[in-house]
Image (tube, rainbow, N blue to C red):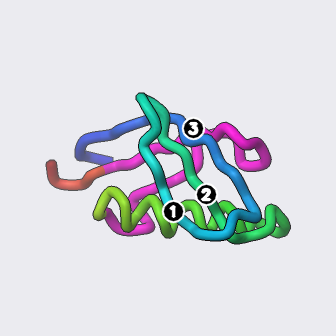
Amino acid sequence: MSGKTENFYVYVKTLSRTSEIKQEDSLLKAYLKSVPIDGRANEELLYLLSRYFKVRRSDIRIKSGRSAKKKLIQIVRKGE
């Protein structure tokens, strides 16, 4: 993989009224409508992050914390 790689943590809150990403102080928090069953919340998170950072969904992955509230996210910006 060539390109710039960014890693950061996101704190996730499921079963929220709205789906949104918020920057709170130096933390990124994701509020998701989805239930944390069968990866639905993780899929919604990746979709929201792709829109928030304006990258393709395939450029984002969950490095650790698939079943945790605190997730390590990796974005690979190809060609930069």
Q: Is residue 69 magenta?
A: yes
**Precedes in sequence: disc 2 or disc 3:** 2
Q: Residue furthest right?
A: 37
Q: What numbered label is drawn on residue 72?
A: 3
In the depicted view, which residue is nearer to us: 8 or 4?
Answer: 8
Residue 16 image point, x, y percent: 70, 63
Marks 2 and 1, how far apart in space?
5 Å
* Badge 1: residue crowd in 10 Å (few <14, some 14–19, many ≥20): some
Residue 5 image point, x, y percent: 33, 40
Residue marked by disc 1: 20
Marks 2 and 3, how far apart in space?
16 Å
x 58%, y 49%: residue = 62
x 45%, y 59%: residue = 49
- Of helix, strand and loop, which one carries label 2? strand
* Badge 3: residue crowd in 10 Å (few <14, some 14–19, many ≥20): some
For the residues labelled 3 and 1, say whether their Cβ atoms are less than 8 Å apart. no
Q: In this picture, which residue range is highlighted in magenta?
A: 55-76
x 62%, y 68%: residue = 43
x 32%, y 57%: residue = 53
Marks 3 and 1, how far apart in space?
18 Å
Residue 31 image point, x, y percent: 61, 57
Residue marked by disc 2: 31
Q: Residue furthest front?
A: 17
Q: Is residue 45 magenta?
A: no
- Of helix, strand and loop, which one carries label 3? strand
**Residue type highlighted by circle 3:** Leu
Q: Quadrant of residue 37?
A: bottom right
**Residue type highlighted by circle 1:** Glu
